[in-house]
Amino acid sequence: MKKTLMLTIAVVFGLTLMMGGAPADVQAKTTFVTIGTGGITGVYYPTGGAIAKMVNAKREEYGIRATVESTGGSAFNVNAIMAGDLEFGVVQSDRQYQAYKGEEGSEWAGKPQPDLRAVFSIHPESVTLCASVDSGIKTVMDLKGKRVNLGNPGSGHLQNSKDTLKAVGLDPETDLKAEYIKAAEAPGLLQDGRIDAFFYTVGHPSGAFKEATAGKTKVMFVPIEGPGIDKLVADNSYYAKSFVPVADYPGAVNDADVPTFGVKATFCTSAAVPDEVVYAITKEVFDNFDTFKKLHPAYAVLTKEGMLEGLSAPIHPGAMKYYKEVGLK
Ligand code: GLU
């Protein structure tokens, strides 16, 4: 009798092990998160990679496994985070503002996203216009009648391109031959003479402009300035004056930095993402700030305090817990 009981216990115990009881427990502790970025020649993609790399190195401690996805960009990322398809995404600060508030004139007009949450801001991004020298484009007004890539639907920069054109009195639909292709394809098309210019809102240096300025076709960065642009920046709190650093692109014909305006890249999530996950990612980036800063030249200007600026959606409680702990809030 006693023997039978012992055997039963042993069998049950063995079965539990065989069915993977213990390994299942370990797996249950791993939270999988996906970070939405942008095209692979931008700065969002390596940014997502940098964050994922730091968090994954501490997988044992946090139980988080982060993967990075190349996406259409900011607007896509906001919508995918809100749909629960992505846990995190890199989002332009202007798109974050518009989505959270449901701003008139934006794609979220009448559809505010109250569950969008900010984690931190990252590098500055400049609205950058690059044209072939042969096109004769020297100002935004010169884009009239030209073939110009404004950006793919889902990108953050499509709206910046339209804002720029409207600010100087050009209609994006009728005054030029607008293209809506991905930023990763634009440099090749410019080099092949199939477009005259393209817009891209991105941190510098970026692979996209390295490629655009390194071919046989001579290209230049076109200044985005003048009274219309001044008014655009003055009227919108998310825009600030900026410039394209030409030292990053020796192949461009410009010999001085090129004035423009810009925004900030920000790291966003949803109110539905658990506090401990957001806390761990925030802590990892901020506790290892010097390591993080070295992961991309566009981060050279970052400060911890600056990374809490430019956020318009509420800060996620998991991130806020960390900021309070270290006295940043
Ligand atoms: N600012 C661009 C966007 O929101 C992406 C830039 C990048 O990938 O670095 O779509």
Image (cartoon, rainbow, N blue to C red):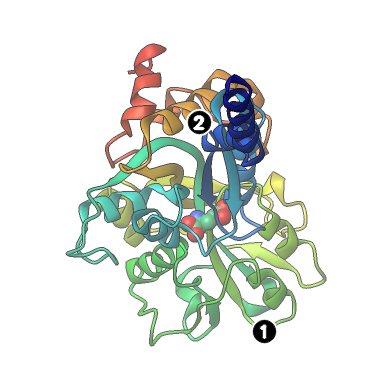
Residue closest to the eye, 209 or 116:
116
Q: Nearer the viewer, mark 2 or mark 1?
A: 2
Tell me the crowding category of disc 2: few under 14, some 14 to 19, or many 20 or more residues within 10 angstroms, Cα based: many
Query: To which residue does mark 1 refer?
Result: 194
Quarter occupied by residue 269: top left
Residue depicted at 55% across the width and 18% down the height: 287
Number of marks present in the image shown: 2
Q: Which residue corresponds to mark 2?
A: 281
Residue 56, above or below 61: below
Assign the C terminus to one quadrant of the image: top left
At x 36% / y 39%, what residue is drawn? 118
What kind of residue is marked 1?
A: Arg
Check mark 2 vs ligand 1: CB closer than 8 Å? yes or no: no
Which of the 4 image quarters holds residue 315?
top left
x, y (%) of residue 55?
Answer: 59, 32
For the question of whether residue 154 can be seen, the reply is yes
Of marks 2 and 1, which one's residue comes earlier in the chain? 1
